[in-house]
Image (cartoon, rainbow, N blue to C red):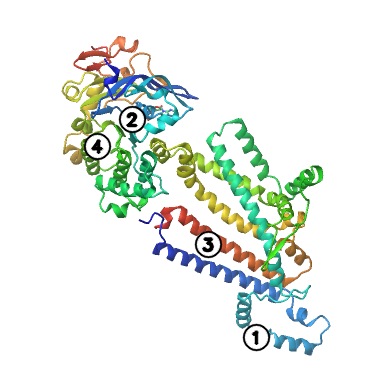
Amino acid sequence: MDLRPRLTLAMIIYIARRLTQGVVVLLAVSLICFIIFRYAGDPVVTLAGRYATLQEREMVRKAFGLDRPFYIQYTRFIANAAQGNFGKSFVSRVPAFGLIIERFPATVELATSAIFISFVLGVGLGVLVSLKPYALRNRFIMAGSLFNISMPTFLTGILLIMVFAVYLKVLPPFGRGETVTIGFWRTGFLTWSGITHLILPAFTLGMYQLAVLLRLTRAGMREVLTEEYIKTAWAKGLPPMKVIFKHALRNALIPVVTMTGLQFGELIAFSIITETIFQWPGMGNLLLTSIYESDQPVIVTYIMLAALIILSLNIIVDILYAYLNPKIRYD
Amino acid sequence: MNNHSHLLLVQELKTYFYTFEGVAKAVDEISFYLDKGETLGLVGESGCGKTVTAMSIMRLIPEPPGRIAHGQILFEGANLLELSMKHMRAIRGKRISMIFQEPMTSLNPVFTVGDQISEMFVLHQNLSKREGWEQAVEMLRTVQIPSPEKRVHEYPHQLSGGMRQRAMIAMALSCNPEILIADEPSTALDVTIQAQIIDLMMQLKEDFDAAIMLITHDLGVIAEIAQRIVVMYAGKVVEEGQTLAIFEEPKHPYTRGLLKSIPKLGERSRYGRQRLQEISGIVPSLYELPPGCSFCPRCPESMAMCQERVPELVDIGEAHRVRCWLY
Ligand SMILES: Nc1ncnc2c1ncn2[C@@H]1O[C@H](COP(=O)(O)OP(=O)(O)O)[C@@H](O)[C@H]1O
Ligand SMILES: [Mg+2]
């Protein structure tokens, strides 16, 4: 007997439809990127150099196909982009994609730690608070979360650095610490120094999400706990752990998981402020430098990658949502 | 009266709710009993404390705002109100189980029917998950759900209201409980489905040899199946007796009112409910009960003294008791 939910035809069609939508959105983003790339400033000047003669410029225009019609150029841009080829950085003269990918692990590890911390603490505290909403301790937690939501990231970061790095001197104030390279992936998870360096930036990045997830979990749990099926669960004689963590939390988690997934994409894509405060060698930091230096290929690569990540996560979240919510899965 | 001779004996139970508006005496000194294998009807209009009575027996009153302020609930002689939560959990679902009014919302929407039924076997009979599922299929078969092997994998929203209530019954009966409390099990369903559910419950009651406490505001349902009836009004028992006695000679004006509002067979469909005689007025708010008999403001036979003093429950015949100044 199969005890697990099965992958149904309806679900396969659902996933296929979401993937198609994703591709369409990605194409739209690429078109915008292409227009920025092609028309914000003349690429011929950039490629041939400021002091090239008219003839040289014409040669470059021909050689790079910049004299061809718009749609042919765009198709080539797409074909290149699909292979991760967005041209070379104007500043460092190496492929932009390589530059970004090199910084990718640092950002992913930071965002993953942040989302992990905020999910575990947010859901845990949210459940705790929902069980006794009027207890003094829980009122403090709620007030704290409100404080957190209204505090800007840079302030959180600076306060954490002041307390834990400057005053208590228990955690390093900036950088990524020692890393270990496995294949193309440079990880900070495997060294003690890497982990201690991760703590403050991860908390800074995840603090806001923690508060949001806490409040979402609490609201969801309070609503679910008044449902009839929870009375049924108690009436069955189930122990509190089963009633709360199986019957109630599973229902309350549906919006929380959706939110977490969506926020994860945003944390990866927009960790710029945190990375800057902690001098974290990630994509956000690179993007900021590239914007100062008008390094278009790097910016475009970043935008495309961010779009891809956010879209993929959106699709994963939708599938997860369908998995958690049988009503969607079967309709 | 020997306390141990009854399967369930509720004595002077008071369950109060402490709210901003004041104290709601939802259940106010109720006493009744339930014998082995018996079917007892608990009737009264909506809001008179039937569900609170049932939830008190299960010890599922939300605290706060609720509290069982006084009384005893003896189950085979042991007071449920004095049990630890751990011992109470071993009784809930296993020896006393309950089904609720709303089949639409009383099953958890994110778990399959099989998951929810098998949970009972895993919890109370130490079966493995797999064995629990096999038993769940058997239970679905018992409650006459067609192709149970398939249905066991379905989610509540894939079942009709009647089927969900059958699944609830399957769940409630899965551990062979001694008492089944059914809180308006058919009220939310279509008339034809209602009859099917009641028939099913009565048939299973024989097979499983359980005592049933059937809560309803519809005396018509009770007439066919209950041996005894307890009539409640505003948290108090107003009349209690054998079904036959109460139907032939209702004593309390409230009971008479309820009886007049039963639709006759056929009338229900042809003319609808508007031809029925309803009791005039509405159930009073528990926060502003009159000082005397609670039913007095609506009573066609009220007297001067009814407004002043609450009548006692008095014996007026063989196991027939009534709370009214007329007797
Ligand atoms: N959670 C609660 N909080 C406050 N009052 C309640 C609560 N539950 C029930 N009551 C009170 O108990 C009264 C009886 O309710 P109930 O037992 O559900 O009636 P019914 O006979 O329709 O099942 C209600 O009118 C209400 O005043
Ligand atoms: Mg009720």
| Res. A315 mark | 3
In percent of width and height, residue B206 lies at 21, 36
Check disc 3: other Cα within 10 Å, few if <14, some if 14-19, many if 20+: many
State which quarter of the image contains the C terminus of chain A.
bottom left
Residue at numbered disc 1: A68
For marks 2 and 3, give the CA distance.
48 Å
Mark 2 C-beta to ligand 1 under 8 Å: yes
Is disc 1 in contact with disc 3, using a CB cutoff of under 8 Å?
no
Identity of the residue drawn at 63% across and 45% down: A211
User: Alpha-carbon distance for marks 4 and 2?
Assistant: 30 Å
Q: Is residue A250 left or right of residue B229?
A: right
Residues B47 and A84: in front is: A84
Of the residues shown, which amino acid type is indicated by label 2? Ser
* For marks 1 and 3 on the same chain, the one whose residue lies earlier in the sequence: 1
- Percent position of residue B14, x then y: 39, 20
- Front tag of 2 and 3: 3
Three-letter code, disc 3: Ile
Observer-nearest residue: A303 or A312? Answer: A312
Question: Residue A101: where, in percent of width, then height?
Answer: 68, 68
Q: Calculate the distance from the C-alpha at mark 1 to the C-alpha at mark 3.
A: 36 Å
